[in-house]
Each structure stands twice: as structure tokens, then as C-alpha cells.
Amino acid sequence: MATSSATTESAEPPASPPPGDAGGPQLGLADRIPLRRIIRWGLAVALVLGIASGAYQTLAAGVFSPAQWRDLVVFGIAQGSIYALIALGYTLVYGILFMINFAHGEVFMAGGFTAFFAARAMDQAGFLNQQPVLAVLILLAIAMAVSTTVAVTLERVAYRPLRNAPRLIPLITAIGASLFLQYSFRGLYGEDIHSYPRIDALTGTWTIAGIPILRTQAIVIVAALALMVGLYFFISRTTMGRSMRAVAEDREIASLMGIDVNRVIVTTFAIGGMLAGAAGILYALVFRQVHFLMGFLPGIKAFTAAVIGGIGSIIGAAVGGLLLGLLEAVAPFLLLSGAGIPAPNQLKDVIAFSILVIVLIMRPGGLFGSREPEKL
């Protein structure tokens, strides 16, 4: 009986300390106040007030007509569609390997720049304007083939040997590969800026739903949307797409289940290269200029778009690209024109990278990612 009583008493939980007793470490006032949350909310309020003030001044002054605002919005969507295609390459590679391929902007450059010489040859032969649809399809095929080849070669030569290395080493390697590709193409194609030949069939506008849209912008938006929808169904409906999702979830378990991880990774780089090559042609249709540094700034903008949407999220990359292109086109005029700034469009890069900083502060995981930043 004594043993049973002792056992019962020892099983009882210890009594909680009295309310006034110091039973553990006491939190100070600074520890109890969520300073980070207060700073975030303060920044959000300041941003809302600043945006509202700038927009009110611009709209009240009547600086732009409704038609001009409409043109800015359409241009922003077209520009954002190009960013989205490039951003998908970043997010696909990150989703599989958890690395940022900073050479992806040069993959985009390689396709668009190489296809220029085919476009010039077809223009000199008269084929570009005689068969514009076939000519554009040929340019797309050339650009996608070149960008895919560059992307797959990068994976095989630069990234595969470092697959199990600390994550900082592939990042440095990607930066080095970016510089290597830039100056290799400078040596191959020269440092001059080349103008893409004009396609007569793509000049002028189409009226869609009562809105006049430049033909080049309409083709860019439709083509980018088709590629993004096709990628979504490829990832969600095909066997290779399911394999890619399995490798992204756990590479080792996917390998044990019989999935060829190397084949999946090569396919991922190939798809990213194809999208980047298509983006290179669409970029050339809109801006009509190519040079060996043309991939740097769009590549950084596309990375920004991937972070905004949530790096690793396909839908996030698409939405982030469209959102960034739209804000970059509209925000400088909407927020700064009313303040009397003479050339607000020159500050579009400031707007783009300010958005990146704000997203990293307010929601580090992006719009479609997790709320908390990943711990390295």
C-alpha cells in the first residue's frame, strides 16, 4: 500500500507556482512588443499614404488622358509577359535544385541575339515579309533551340559537378557563368547594338474588345499566355511533370522510387531554356534591339518577379512577372508625374527594385509562397 501511494504521488504533476512567484524568466517590455510587426505596419501605412498622395496629385492634374493610361497598361502587360516567361526558368530551377541560376538572363540573350542573324538573312531575301507567320515560327524555333542548348550545357558543365556542394558555391558559379556567357557572345557577335528588321504584317494595331492594341504587343501577350498555360498543364498532367514535382519534394526519395533524377533536372533546364528563347524573340518584337548585355537587366527583373510571386511557385512567377511589368510601366507616371518630376519613366528601375525590397520586408516568401523566409 505504501509503495502504491508513493507511486501515485510521484505521478501527480508538480504544482504550478503562485501567481506572484517568479517561476521562470520574465519578458521585458521590449520583448513583449512585436517590434517587427509594428515596423511592417508602419511601413505599410506610409506606403499607402504615399501612393494615394502621388496618385491623387497626378490624376487631379490631368497629366494623361484615359487613352494614354490604357496604352501604358497594355504595354505593362506585354512587358510583364516577357518577365514572366524568364521568371519561370528561375522558379523551375529553384524548385528542383534550390539554387538561383543567375546565368538565366544570358540564356535569354543567347536565343534572341542568335536569331537576329537569321532574321536579317530572311529580311534581305524578302522572306520575312512574304511569309511573316512562317518566318516568326522559324525565329522562335532557332531562339528556343539555342537557349535550350546553352541552358542544358550550363547544367551539365557548370552545375552538375557542384550539385552536392554548399549552396553558396553554385551561386558564385552562376554569377561567373553569367559573365562568361556575356563576353563570349560579345566576342562572337560583337559589341554593337543591332536592330531587328521590321515585319510589315506586325505594324499597326488590332482592335480587341474595343481597345486598340499594337499588333506586336497583342502577339506577345497571347504567345506568353499560351506558353504559361502549356507549362502549367505539362507540370500538372504529364508523367514528366509529376516526376519533376516528386524531385522538387524530395530528391532522394524520388530516386529510390525509380525516378531518373538527372533526366528530370536536364528536362527542367531545357524547359527553362525554351521559355527564355521564346521570351528573347518576343522581346525583340517589342523593343527591336539586341546586344550582348540585353539579358542582364531583364534577367534581374525576372528574378525580382519570381521573388514577388514566390520563388519556386509557377503561378507565382507568372503573376509576379505580369504585376512587375504593369507596375513598372504605370507606377512612375502615376506616382511621380503629379509631383512635377520631369522624366518619371527614368525611375522605372527604382520602382521595380523598391517593390522587391518591400516584398522581402513585408512577405519574404512572396505572394504565393510561405510567409516566413527560408532559414539557411
Image (spheres, rainbow, N blue to C red):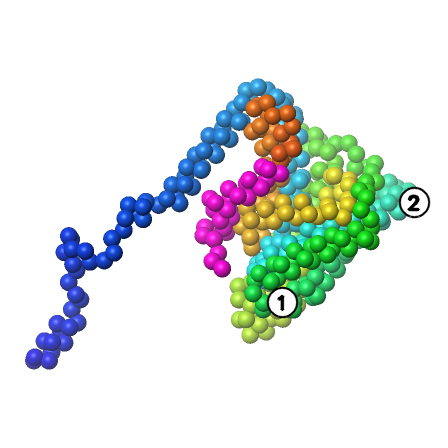
Q: State the image coordinates of residue 27 (x, y, percent, origin top left).
A: 27, 51
| Residue that sits furthest to the right in the current view | 125
Which sits in the foreground, 188 or 116?
188
Q: Amino acid at mark 1?
A: Leu
Residue 16 vertical placement versus 361 (above, below): below
Residue 126 vertical placement versus 347 (above, below): below
Q: State the image coordinates of residue 339 (x, y, percent, origin top left).
A: 56, 24
Locate the N terminus by quadrant: bottom left
Residue carrying label 2? 125
Instruction: Name the residue located 73 percent from the left edge and 47 percent from the top edge.
Output: 293
Q: State the image coordinates of residue 34 (x, y, percent, origin top left).
A: 35, 45
Q: Is residue 374 magenta?
A: yes
Q: In front: mark 2 or mark 1?
A: 1
Instruction: Name the residue located 15 percent from the left edge and 63 percent from the top edge.
Output: 15
Cα separation between marks 2 and 1: 46 Å
Label located before the other in sequence (2 or 1): 2
Q: Which residues are magenta?
A: 349-376
- At mark 2, the secondary structure is loop
Residue 55 vertical placement versus 33 (above, below): above
Q: State the image coordinates of residue 292 (x, y, percent, origin top left).
A: 76, 48
Q: Is residue 192 left or right of residue 43?
A: right
Which sits in the foreground, 219 or 35?
35
Instruction: Name the residue located 72 percent from the left edge and 41 percent from the top edge.
Output: 219
Q: Is residue 101 magenta?
A: no
* Label 1 Cα neighbours within 10 Å, binned few <14 / some 14-19 / many ≥20: some
Residue 363: tell me if it is visible.
yes
**Which image quarter: residue 262?**
bottom right
**Which image quarter: residue 99?**
bottom right
Numbered label tally? 2
Q: Amino acid at mark 2?
A: Ala
Residue carrying label 1? 162
